[in-house]
Amino acid sequence: MNSEKTIDELCKLFHDQLSADYSARDIDRFIALSFHQLMDWNKLDISLNKQLDLEDDKYDQFNNILDRLKNSEPIQYILGSTLFYDLEIKVSSAVLIPRPETEELVELVSKHIKDGDKILDIGTGSGCIALALKSKIKNLQVKGIDISEDALQIARLNAKNLQLEIDLEKKDILFDDQLGKWNCIVSNPPYITKKEVAYLGKNILDHEPKTALFVPDKKPLIFYERIATLAIKSLLPNGLLFFEIHEEKGPEIVKLLASLGFKNVEVKKDLQGKDRMVKAAV
């Protein structure tokens, strides 16, 4: 037995080489995701086979993942997919990695829509929001729009793989004012200012698409204002607008939406107790 290439030694190697930059919990998650991807194993399989030798080619694959993690590349991009709302979503550096708080946005939206509703997802990226809503309520008419053709290709692949029918279209909402009519509009737009760059990790700055992250320092609500201005004209009677928001921008966004004529504007907290979502009615 080559003790250096047992599963136990491989797990120790991950922890030894990543502990300076990641928590033990994160490293365990990287290990679990890697084994699921490369060997279709769960955590119990890993635990029961700690003394098993890995074949050289398989060991090299794990080492490649480790090297990329050491370079701050997100595990989701390395593996090419992530789980979102129990759906396997393909991702690449063309799209943002779906976050747990966005799952909470999907859950909030799903409580306020019904069969037959028409839903528009602005800035759809990987399609995760649109596809999660479609998976929850099958008879929805769902459309996702995005400025990036590369992102839309990923969204189309996800729709095909998940066998969920949604419409996808390239559109720049800063310049195109024709959205159609909808019961619900949802968006997780860019909201990070350039002055906040110092607080972001290399895994985000070096790898995730900047057009999906950043807004001008002088116009931090540029997308919220534009989307809301279009939504007030595009939502059907009793229609709803949902946003994911920067945790510090809740009061400003509430004031903005009220000034545009929205009613019953509410800020919702995420599971961490942070202001993260806004719901508004026409």
Image (cartoon, rainbow, N blue to C red):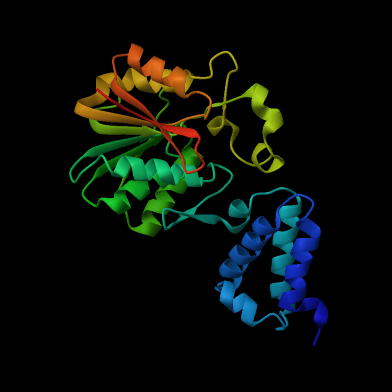
In the rendered picture of this protein, how many numbered marks are placed on residues?
A: 0
Pick the residue in front: 223 or 259.
259
Where is 120 relative to 87, above or below?
A: above
Q: Position of residue 61 (x, y in %)?
A: 69, 67
Looking at the image, residue 83 sits to the left or right of residue 74; the answer is left
Q: Is residue 36 visible?
A: yes
Where is 241 relative to 8, above or below?
A: above
**Which residue is painted at 25% across and 27% down in the image?**
180
Q: Is residue 174 visible?
A: no
Looking at the image, residue 14 sits to the left or right of residue 154; the answer is right
Q: Quadrant of the N terminus?
A: bottom right
**Which residue is painted at 28% across and 43% down in the image?**
111
**Which residue is painted at 53% across and 27% down in the image?**
191
**Which residue is painted at 71% across and 79% down in the image?**
54
Q: Residue furthest bottom?
A: 1
Where is 229 relative to 205, above or below?
A: above
Q: Position of residue 155 (x, y in %)?
A: 43, 46
Locate residue 120: give its quadrant: top left
Locate residue 48: give its quadrant: bottom right
